[in-house]
Image: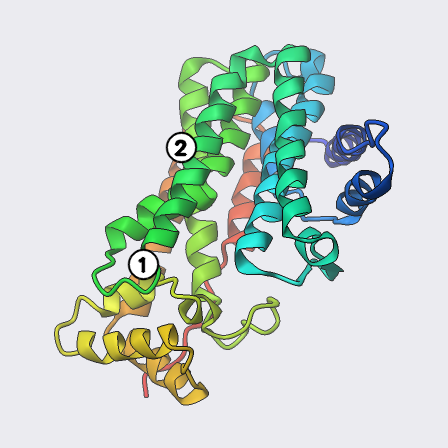
Amino acid sequence: MEHYDKREFNREMEQVEQCLSEYLCDPGYGGAVAEILADLKKSKGKRLRPGLLLMASRYGADFRKTREKLCRLGALVELVHMASLVHDDIVDDAPIRRGLPTTQAKYGKDMAVYAGDLILSRIVQSLFRDGFEPVGKDFSDTVEAMCLGELGQMECRFREDATAEQYMRNIYGKTAALCRLACLAGARMSGCSEEIQAQLEQLGIHFGYMFQIRDDLLDFVSDSAAEGKLTWMDFREGILTLPVLYAMEKEEIRPQIVELIRSAKAGNFSSEDAGKLTRLTVVSGGMRRAVQDMEKHMTMALGTIENLPDHGVSNVFRELLKTKCSIPEMPAPV
């Protein structure tokens, strides 16, 4: 088994940060442009996606000689995520992200739109300038999928006829597509065989599905406050997630949830309504089925790892699946 060096990985992640600072440098405009870019540098996320890319790249024969490019590529994947968050905050009218004022709250929605676009332009520049043509289409496909996922979610807001199938299609674009890109781009640029690329691509997809379903479950379980989310915030905004959609498949439950959807749309969703919705998703089995879907993607992700070459990073992937996609404690039926 090839050894996985944690210290080496940490140094690479530091290089990713350096690349991000470079990509977010002021082009000489000064003023608000310089301030916005400086603020974005301060917004430190978990850097999950660059981590996935660098982990996946370790299965490639060219990993060591392409390491510098891989760190730069990891920064580009993070920039896609960053641009999407800047735009998401405009749509959500979000005042705070990661403890700091959002771009739209501090500088206005117009400036935030163009700030997100500026980040995307930096990505395109680097893809053509720095020899990343092999993954250029992967990036464009991912951005398209992300846009379609968000459009699909907006179309389904407060929709009483929304389905679980639509939800899964939307979260592929919202979350799974970018995790797919991270794993696939790392595999492709490090010289992995097509077979290994395909396995890592599937690993990224299943990880993304798991990650998003868990995030949606945290919208209404007991530890949601610790995760920084308000209870049933998605539902209040008209976003119907998997536990709700599964619950609505029960004929005796559906009318009660439709009534709650209408209350939320009218802005009258109360704490009593939240308690009722939690109870309905539990007694209908909707919450349990959502957890089962999450477990299904966990099993499939672990299966792809078994098909990868023998490398120490495989255990790191397994541990990541356990920590980032742990199953939250479900409320008991009442």
Pointer 2 or 1: first along the chain:
2
The dot on residue 202 is 2
Residue 269 at x, y percent in the picture: 41, 81
**Residue 3: in sight, yes or no?**
no
Residue 333 at x, y percent in the picture: 32, 83
Q: Depth check: give the residue in front, 296 or 235.
A: 235
Distance from Cα at disc 2 to Cα at disc 1: 19 Å
User: Where, quadrant-wise, is the C terminus in this rendering?
Assistant: bottom left
Q: Is residue 196 left or right of residue 15?
A: left
Displayed quadrant of residue 96: bottom right
Q: Depth check: give the residue in front, 65 or 114.
A: 114
Residue at screen point 54% across, 23% down: 185
Displayed quadrant of residue 280: bottom left
In the image, residue 160 sits, relative to residue 252, either above or below, namely: above
Residue 132 at x, y percent in the picture: 60, 14
Q: Residues within 10 Å of mark 1 (few under 14, many from 20)?
A: few
Q: Depth check: give the residue in front, 27 or 60.
A: 27
In the image, residue 16 sits, relative to residue 267, either above or below, namely: above
What residue is disc 1 on? 292
Judged from the image, the secondary structure of the residue bearing numbered disc 1 is helix
In the image, residue 96 sits, relative to residue 204, either above or below, namely: below
Mark 1: which amino acid? Gln
